[in-house]
Image (cartoon, rainbow, N blue to C red):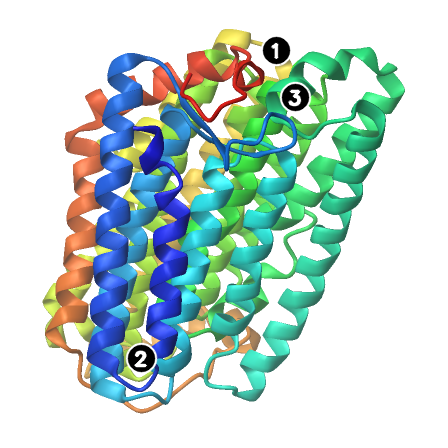
Amino acid sequence: MSALVPLLVALPLLGAGIALVFGRQRRVQVGVSVVTLTLVLAIAAVLLYTVDSSGQAIAVSVGGWPIPFGIVLYVDRLAALLVVISSIVLLAVLLFSVGQGAADGDDDTPVTIFHPSYLILSAGIFNAFIAGDLFNLYVGFEILLVASYVLITLGSTESRIRAGVVYIVVSLVSSILFLAAIAAIYGALGTVNIAQLAERMTELPDSTQLVLHLMLLLAFSIKAAVFPLSFWLPDSYPTAPAPVTAVFAGLLTKVGVYAMIRTETQIFRDNDVNTLLLIVALATMIVGVLGALAQAELKRILSFTLVSHVGYLVFGLAIATPLALGATIYYMVHHIIVQTTLFLAVGLVERRAGSTSILKVKGLMRAAPLLAVLFFIPAINLGGLPPFSGFIGKLALFDAAAEVGTPLMYLLIVGGIVTSLLTLYTLMRAWNLAFWREDDDHSEETGVVERISYLGDAPAADDEGARRVIPRIMTATTAGMVAVTVALTVFAGPLYALCASIGDALLTPVTLVQLDDGGGS
């Protein structure tokens, strides 16, 4: 099975090269992209089954170089699960973009550039998830960031270029911090291999460990959009084309959270900053959802809720118990799927209504009842309404915090409940205005507008554009993703059991240092 591991990165890179060669042949590019991501999904599923059934991770030292000189790829349950979920999301968004491209041409997502960039982005995400050392993790970040620079500016509109510049500057600052931390760690310990760092970190003075720890946390917090380092996200993501926004929202911040999970549980197990993380988690949840309340544009609302729900993941990480880590992994899977689905649904709203402003869109329940359902189901799921996966994940996090039982934990539980209720209120208000409010109900409309008049000065409150036909493949893809969100609830038992086993294993030191020949462990 170890021979399959490098293919997770090699196949998307090879596919990107082929797609670039056939730059003017849309069908070939689409075929290459779909086949590539389907193969990656199949390989990842096989690897997940293998590591879960055997209880052992698979590690490969690329090229046969001995550790720590070689590049180590490491696939355990966590890495395999996230690659499977990422492949599903990337494949679904790709199909959504194919429908959009076929309907609109190359104006919004130039096909010559989009497919190679999208596959390179995929390679970077997969590489980050299976990296066995910090430098390879850094390389994964840079691969996906370079591709994301291209994708976020597709179409070259003024707003996208402006947002892209902010995104690039913030990402470069994060990358510089990450690279500086790697250099300092290598200078102090002579390795960047995660397993070796876990063994050697205790050799350093506590103050030195703390400095290195905070440097990495700062770099990853920028990438994960943790408050107060999340200022860039709500202005960057909404300007991109709908497929790009969906995949960014679902996956890119989770790569930063994943890096935090790996370093916190395996490298800095004995260096406690959990109190700081708890405070940051509470601020991220509350500030994010309050920002969502003040928005009038659907993509900005979802961008702020994205920030607030990153707070739940940091909350679970900071509890630092096996139960909490399992709940965090489950909630991460839930949030990747649900957040992506909501952005796809908003992409359909934008085409059908010509706007994503809740002050402008109305009457969609009568005009597009299927679209109303496609938005409503993931919205109540994200809001944590039982019995959906959002409720299951949050309840598991609160249960883990209650087991610890400190006053700060109870404060976080209250903050999490308030955030969940405000998320539900914000999304249901948006659904009510966009779908339930009738076109011809002028008296009711006047009352509604008066009650939300404070949103009139919100960014993009007057956003309007041309209405466009929704291709069937875009609707079918979104419906498929909604079905996946429901499956997270239907199959919550086995999925949560898998996540619980991941939570237990994360607090056990990895054994990559035993490998020097590319074998498995």
Residue type at mark 2? Answer: Phe
Q: Earlier in the sequence, mark 1 or mark 3?
A: 3
Secondary structure beneath dot 2 equals: loop
Q: Nearer the viewer, mark 2 or mark 3?
A: 2
Q: Is residue 208 above or below residue 184?
A: above
| Residue to which mark 2 is pinned | 22
**Earlier sequence position, callout 1 versus callout 2:** 2
Q: Quadrant of the N terminus?
A: top left
Q: CA distance from mark 1 to mark 2?
A: 59 Å
How far from the left and from the top, in percent, is residue 94? 28, 64
At a point 21% along the width and 59% down the height, the residue shown is 35
Q: Residue at x 57, y 87 (%)?
A: 158
**Can residue 311 be spotted in the picture?**
no
Q: Position of residue 58 (x, y in %)?
A: 39, 24
Quadrant of res 520: top left
Q: In the rendering, at what x and y percent does residue 165 appear?
A: 66, 74
Foreground label between 1 and 2: 2
- In the shown orientation, is residue 393 left or right of residue 135? left
> Of helix, strand and loop, which one carries label 3?
helix
- Under mark 3, the amino acid is Ile
C-alpha gap between disc 1 and disc 3: 25 Å
Question: Looking at numbered disc 1 in the image, what kind of residue is underneath it?
Answer: Thr
From mark 2 to mark 3, how far is it between C-alphas? Answer: 44 Å
Mark sitting on residue 436:
none
Image location (x, y in percent) of residue 187:
84, 31
Residue labelled with disc 3: 267
Kindly tell me whether residue 154 is visible in this rendering: yes
Mark in the foreground, 1 or 3: 3
Residue marked by disc 1: 406
